[in-house]
Amino acid sequence: MTTPPAMTTPIESRLLEDSIKRVWNEHDDARRLAAMREIYHPDAVIFEPSRAVTGHQAISDVVRDVLRDMPPGFTFRVVGPTLGHHGVATTRWEGGPADTVIVSGVDVVRVKDELLIEHYFYFDPQA
């Protein structure tokens, strides 16, 4: 029996997880924008069910507004696995304070020039 070769984490998977951890959980505008420059393409677009938003500042403003509307202690958490290949990745996530889940869903991203260029959000229906 042969052992499969060791696999490295694809860049699209790493970028997706980094975006959730370093952008979508960052309350400080300057730190969030600095992280975005490392993760998101300058022409990046996020796609929510009701709108599309383009560019670092506009996306940062969306993140700021989302976090401002959440209860104290709220964080987004990857509950994966995060899967990616050929420039596309997806993961499952949830958000809430501590062990509480108040929102959950799936993200899908596409990479261009080793940065996220498209980020799609799919939200689970709320009970």
Image: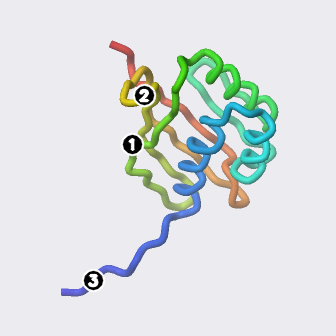
Q: Are marks 3 and 1 in contact (CB under 8 Å)?
A: no
Q: Secondary structure at mark 2?
A: strand
Counting from the top left corner in percent of width and height, residue 114 is at 69, 60
C-alpha distance separating marks 3 and 1: 27 Å
Q: Are marks 2 and 3 in contact (CB under 8 Å)?
A: no
Most extreme residue toward the top is: 127
Q: Nearer the viewer, mark 3 or mark 1?
A: 1
Q: Residues within 10 Å of mark 3 (few under 14, many from 20)?
A: few
- Tell me the residue that label 3 is attached to: 3
Residue 70 drawn above or below residue 76: above
Residue 1 drawn above or below residue 11: below
Q: Amino acid at mark 2?
A: Ser
Residue 27 drawn above or below residue 90: above
Nearest the viewer among 11 and 68 is 68
Q: Earlier in the sequence, mark 2 or mark 3?
A: 3
- Tell me the residue that label 1 is attached to: 79
Query: Quadrant of the image for the C terminus?
Result: top left
Query: Quadrant of the image for the N terminus?
Result: bottom left
C-alpha distance separating marks 2 and 3: 36 Å
Q: Residues within 10 Å of mark 2 (few under 14, many from 20)?
A: many
Residue at 48%, 56% in the rendered image: 84
Most extreme residue toward the bottom is: 1
Left or right for 52, reference 70: right
- Tell me the residue that label 2 is attached to: 104
Q: Are marks 1 and 2 in contact (CB under 8 Å)?
A: yes
Q: Amino acid at mark 1?
A: Val
Residue 44 occupies quadrant: top right
Residue at 37%, 81% in the rendered image: 5
Counting from the top left corner in percent of width and height, residue 48 is at 59, 26
Residue at 78%, 46% in the rendered image: 34
